[in-house]
Amino acid sequence: MASRSQGLLIGCLLFISAFAVVAILIAFLFGFSTTFPALGSDRVGLIKIEGPISNVDAWIDEIEANRTDSSVGAVVLRINSPGGEVAPSQELYNAVTRLQQTKPVVASFGSVAASGGYYAAVPADTILANPGTLTGSIGVIFSFPTARELLEKIGLRYEVYKSGDLKDIGSFSRRPSEQDDAVFDALVADVYDQFVEAVMEGRGMTRSEVLPLADGRIFSGRQAVEVGLVDGLGDLHQAILTAASMAGISGEPRVVRKARPLAPIWFLLDDLMRGQLGPLTSPALQYRTR
């Protein structure tokens, strides 16, 4: 009888151990929350947006996870980014807007939160920066190299057959024509206007208030407070306390981060190469500091 009971106990322990191993594997493969669900909204979620803005899927997943987690009462976006591509910056902006419609959001600026990094933050209820943070850089940049003279020197001709005058616009084998310039100017102006409108809506400013600040210049955190682009000065700890206060959380808040799945090394290398070589290999509209 004792032998049978001992066998059942061992069997149960083996089953529990196997279940735990499987659960851990699933967590590491598909991502998991660093905390377990709790009753009430007594926690502050922390999301770190760092580096050039290009592939934003993982950041948006984090934002959505915090938005739908009822135990998270408020969220802090820690931004340390010089900006990046336009469309991904707008996707981040939209995700932050949805989050802000659900719970309080505080943006905390690190060393730099400029151009697209600033764009993503403007829907936040409150923006805090360090005095020496570099921010602003409201504007658009579109660049590409041309190599016509180099090709001529080495005796290489680049023949192009196209269906319309503008089909090879931006080609490295020729200089932009006046028609090209007109198209690029209109394109940049339109996307620039989208940035200005986002700042107007997010910061509650008029167009006449934004335009003098939107010539691409950068501001220190202290300067940004003076011109209304940032609400106040404070570090990450202050941002967390501010978010907790906005959510009605008393005492020291519990900070949680949603773990992100480990990206394959080639995805990481792709993001790095896109950030460093993207403007040379595939021209794209960008909200970024030069």
Image (cartoon, grey):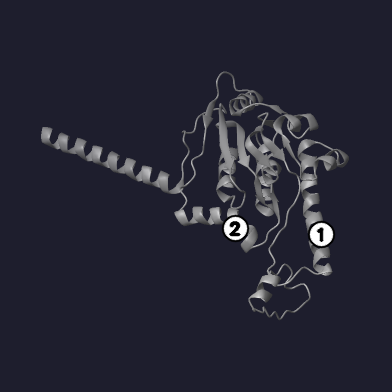
- The foreground one among 157 and 42 is 157
- Disc 1 target residue: 185
The residue shown at (78%, 56%) is: 188
Mark number, residue 77: none
The residue shown at (65%, 52%) is: 88
Q: Is residue 1 visible?
A: no
CB under 8 Å between discs 1 and 2: no
Q: Looking at the image, is mark 1 or mark 2 nearer the viewer?
A: 2
Identify the residue at the far front of this view.
153
Specify few, some or many for label 1: CA neighbours under 10 Å numbering under 14, 14-19, or 20 or more.
few
Q: Secondary structure at mark 2?
A: helix
Specify few, some or many for label 2: CA neighbours under 10 Å numbering under 14, 14-19, or 20 or more.
few
The residue shown at (56%, 18%) is: 251
- Mark 2 residue type: Leu
- Disc 2 target residue: 277
The x and y percentages for residue 205 are 82, 37
**Total number of numbered discs in the rendering:** 2
Q: Quadrant of residue 199?
A: top right
The x and y percentages for residue 220 are 71, 33
- The foreground one among 231 and 60 is 231
Q: Is residue 192 visible?
A: yes
Instruction: Please tell me whether residue 228 is drawn above or below residue 83 in the rendered image.
Output: above
> Which badge, 1 or 2, comes first in the chain's sequence?
1
Left or right placement of residue 207 versus residue 162 in this view: right
Q: Secondary structure at mark 1?
A: helix
The x and y percentages for residue 198 are 77, 44
- Mark 1 residue type: Asp
The x and y percentages for residue 156 are 64, 78
Q: Quadrant of residue 243?
A: top right
- The foreground one among 280 and 237 is 280
The residue shown at (56%, 42%) is: 62
